[in-house]
Image (cartoon, rainbow, N blue to C red):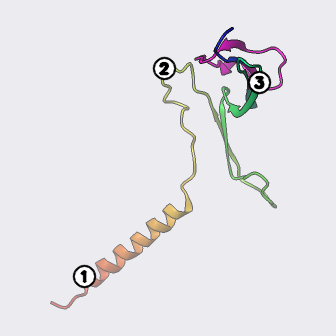
Amino acid sequence: MEDRSSVIIFIDDDQQPVGSFKSPINFELDTRKLPDGEHFLRIVSQDPSGKEGIRKIPFTVRNGPDITVEGLQENEVVDGVLPIMVSAYGKGDQKIFLIEGSETPRSIPNWIWVLHIGFGGWAIYYLLTQLFIAP
């Protein structure tokens, strides 16, 4: 009789397991074979006495190009004309770093503009007060 637990690994609700192993195991999950989106890893374990345990681990696959949208949030209530910027870029082959197209262009956040205007106003005030101090 074997003293180790057996482990069967499934992806999503597939009836065909990825593999069946004796515990402990190390394996690599190749997500390139999965479509982008929500998935879960279902691990079924059975100890030597026959008792089973199940664990589901949800994960998200995103092997395709990353898509970012600026100007529209999920479930946002909108009206009128919306300026929307969409950017999509891929990771390449992960052996060579691609500089061009690897960043998501974004507009400057409002708090940066407020900080810039505030600092400029303070600098002008300081300059004017220093220029007109009586000698």
The image position of residue 101, as x and y in percent, is 56, 32
Residue type at tag 2: Ile
Residue 100 magenta: no
Work out whether mark 1 precedes mark 2 in sequence or the reverse, and give the earlier one. Answer: 2
Q: Secondary structure at mark 3?
A: loop
Spatial CA distance of label 3 from label 1 is: 82 Å
Q: Which label was assigned to residue 96?
A: 2
Q: Which residue is mark 1?
A: 130
Provide the residue span drawn in magenta.
8-36
Q: Nearer the viewer, residue 75 or 34?
A: 34
Asked if disc 2 and disc 3 are in contact, CB closer than 8 Å, the reply is: no
Q: Which residue is mark 3?
A: 51
Report if residue 31 is visible in the image: yes
Q: Nearer the viewer, residue 3 or 8?
A: 3
Between tags 1 and 2, which lies in front?
Answer: 2
87 left or right of 46 in image: left
The image position of residue 89, as x and y in percent, is 62, 31
SS assignment for the magenta stretch, majority:
loop
At 50% from the left and 68% from the top, the residue drawn is 114
Q: Quadrant of residue 129?
A: bottom left
Residue 25 magenta: yes
- Few, some or many residues within 10 Å of mark 2 (<14, 14–19, 20+): few
Spatial CA distance of label 1 from label 2 is: 55 Å
Q: Image height check: is 24 above or below 81?
A: above
